[in-house]
Image (tube, helix red, strand yellow):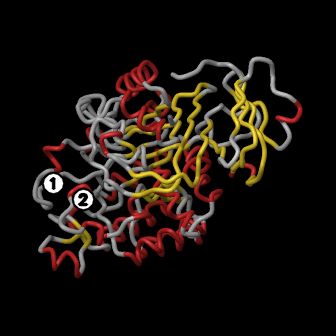
Amino acid sequence: MLSGHRPILLANARIVDPARDLDGPGDVLIADGIIRDARHGIGAAGAPEGADIINCAGMIVAPGLIDIRAFVGEPGAGHRETFASASRAAAAGGITTIVCQPDTSPVIDNSATVDFVLRRARDTAIVNIHPMAALTKGLAGKEMTEIGLLKQAGAVAFTDGARSVMNAQVMRRALAYARDFDALIVHHTEDAHLVGDGVMNEGELSSRLGLTGVPAAAEAVMLERDMRLVGLTGGRYHAASLTCAESLDILMRARDAGLPVTASASINHLTLNENDIGPYRTFLKLSPPLRGEDDRRALVAALASGLIDVVMSDHNPQDVETKRLPFAEAAAGAIGLETMLTAALRLVHNAELDFITLIRAMSTRPAELLGLPGGSLRPGAPADVIVIDPDVPWILDPANLKSQCKNTPFDESRFSGRVVRTIVGGRTVFEHA
C-alpha cells in the first residue's frame, strides 16, 4: 500500500455521492479508516494536523466502486488471476470491493472454501473481496447448497456463475429457501439448449461471418421462467447479465407486478456491440454474446431510467492459448476490472448518462443489494473512495494492465477520463503516476 492511516483531505473536488443525491463542489475528510465529513467548506475550516492535503481541483471524488461479477482464479486457477493481481487491477480501475464468483476449483459450495477465500483475500489483496457461493452443489444444477450456512460463513449472494440452473424445480426450491434467509439469488439467464453451439449473437452478421448464433430468446425464455418462479416463491432475485431489449420488457413487467427483482448489465454490453467483433476478434467473444446496436441502446436507456440496477465488469481472464484460436473454438470472456469505469465514461461524455446515475449503478446499488458497507460518502462510512480525472485522454496499452491475463476488448482504445487515486479503508492503494 502506498500510504498509511494519516488523515487525508481531498480538497476542492466535485463530490458525487448518489447515497445523498449529491453532485456538487466540496471536500472529503478521511481519518481512522472512515469518512469524517464530505461537504462544502471543510478545507476552509482547516485540515487536521499532519493530514495529507490533496488538491482535487477539476477532479471528481466518489465512493469506491463495487464490482459484483468478477472471476478470480483462486482456488485452482491462479495462473489466470490471483487475489493479489485482481486487487491491483481493481484498484487501478477504482474498484474498492470485488465480489468473486464460485466457479473455481474446488467450487465455492461449502463453508470451508468460503473461509479460505476470505482468509486468502485478507492476506494478499489490497481491496475488499467478498465471495458469492454456489447456488447448487458442484454447480451441477441438481441439488441446492446449504444457503443458510454459507451465508453465515460470509457468502454475500448465491449463483452458479456462468451456468444456468435448467431444472425449474431446483430453482424454485432455491428461491424459496433463500427467501427464509433473505439471501439474494443471482442467476445467469441463458437456456443452454437454445444456446447450443452458438458463439455470437444470432442475426445477419453471424450468418455473414459463418458463425453459429445465440438467439436473444435464449435469454428471454430463461428470464421469463425465473420471473414466474419469483412470483411463486417471493425470493429475492437478480439477473446476472441482461443483454437484449426483449429481456428488459420482461423485467419491467415483473417490476410493475411488485416482484423483488433486480438486474445487472456488463460494461461490455453497454459500450460495445456485435459489429465490434470485426474480423473474428476473439477478445470480444463473450457469454452472453454482444448484441446489436439497438439492444445496446436499450440497455443504456434502462440504466439511465433505473430499470437496470448495476453495472459490472464481468471480469473473466483467459490464457493466450485459449484466445488465440478460431473464433468458434476460443474461450469466452474478457478482463474488465481496470477498464470498467473508464469505458463507462464514454456514456457520460456522449450525454447518454449522468455521473450520479453511473456511480449509483457501480457503487451505491451494489452495496444496497448485497448488504455491504460502502457505496456512500456519508460521515461514518468506510473510507473507500476514488478520485477521477474525468477528461484526461489516454490510450490503453494491454501490456500496462495489472491483470495476469490481457484479454481486453479495449486493446489500443482511446479513452477520456481515468481513476487517479484509489483509497481503501483510509489507505491510498493506487495513485496514477
Q: Write down the quadrant of residue 32 in the picture.
A: top right
Q: Residue farthest to the right?
A: 45
Residue 416 location, x and y as percent? 50, 56
Image disc number at residue 427: none
Q: Residues within 10 Å of mark 2 (few under 14, many from 20)?
A: many
Residue drawn 44% across the image and 64% down it: 270
Q: Residue farthest to the bottom?
A: 204
Amino acid type of the residue tagged 1 in the rendering: Ala
Residue drawn 46% across the image and 45% down it: 68
The answer to whether any part of residue 160 appears in the image is no
Check the image and report above or below for 379 versus 316: above
Q: How crowded is mark 1: few (under 14 residues within 10 Å), some or many (20 or more)?
A: many
Residue 35 location, x and y as percent? 72, 32
Q: Earlier in the sequence, mark 2 or mark 1?
A: 2
Badge 1 element: loop
Badge 2 element: loop
Give the left or right position of residue 111, taking residue 156 as reference.
left
Front residue (pair 26, 81): 26
Task: Give the alpha-carbon distance from disc 2 to disc 1, as whole Å.
Answer: 8 Å
The answer to whether any part of residue 332 appears in the image is yes
Tags 2 and 1 touching, CB below 8 Å: yes
Residue drawn 25% across the image and 55% down it: 283
Residue 357 location, x and y as percent? 62, 59
Front residue (pair 258, 350): 350
Check the image and report above or below for 252 versus 85: below
Residue indicated by mark 2: 285
Amino acid type of the residue tagged 2 in the rendering: Lys
Check the image and report above or below for 341 versus 259: above
Query: How many badges with numbers are in the image?
Result: 2
Residue indicated by mark 1: 330
Residue drawn 37% across the image and 29% down it: 83
Front residue (pair 6, 246): 6
